[in-house]
Image (cartoon, rainbow, N blue to C red):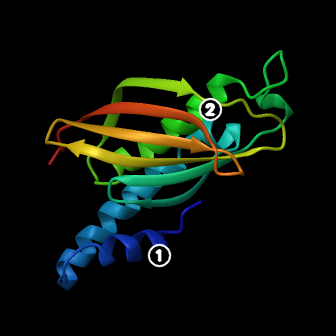
Amino acid sequence: MVSLANYLLTTQAQSQTVSTIDFAAVFLKDTIVIMRIEKDLFARHVGIEILDMAAGRATARLKIEKHHLNGIEITQGGAIFTLADFVLAAASNSHGPVAVAINASISFCKPTGQGSVLTAEAREVSRNRKTASYTIQVSDDNNETVAIFQGMVYIKKSSS
């Protein structure tokens, strides 16, 4: 899992110098974001590991095991979609407000099998106060593209 310290250092390095009060607010927001991502029980059950997360981006990986395979012994499309959807959630929620997927599509480019390690990298393409769009590339251990995922999220209003 991504460590709170690494996430905070990455996030702070991208921003201006902040006061102690600002840092405390950022720390609280970032702690809540990380706790939200780490509470994803389905991702944990499937075996997804978050590697990196910063404002508008995230990276995670999944080692393909026998239970991730379909009937023709290749990685089940749902396992790849789940990995991509998880980094969409991490990247879109990295700003603080809760964001939920409203549209997603995936193109499968290359099959993989048991023993492969898939890495998904999410990148924010656009963001406004209500929606945001992301591109996620899923690659194998040879850095070859396995799938390309496009996702859009709705950004919920803060309860404050």
- Pick the residue in front: 50 or 136: 136
Could you tell me which residue is drawn at 24 percent across and 69 percent down? 25
Mark 2 vs mark 1, foreground winner is: 2
Q: How many marks?
A: 2
Residue 45 horizontal side relative to residue 31, left or right: right
Q: Which residue is mark 2?
A: 80
Residue 134 horizontal side relative to residue 78, left or right: left
Bin the neighbour count of mark 2 within 10 Å (Cα to Cα): few under 14, some 14-19, many 20 and up.
many
Could you tell me which residue is drawn at 53 percent across and 68 percent down? 3
Could you tell me which residue is drawn at 52 percent across and 25 percent down? 107
> Residue 158: image x %, image y %?
18, 44
Kindly identify the amino acid type of the residue bearing the numbered disc 2: Ile
Could you tell me which residue is drawn at 40 percent across and 40 percent down? 135
Disc marking residue 5: 1
> Residue 12: image x %, image y %?
31, 75
Q: Identify the secondary structure beneath mark 1.
A: helix
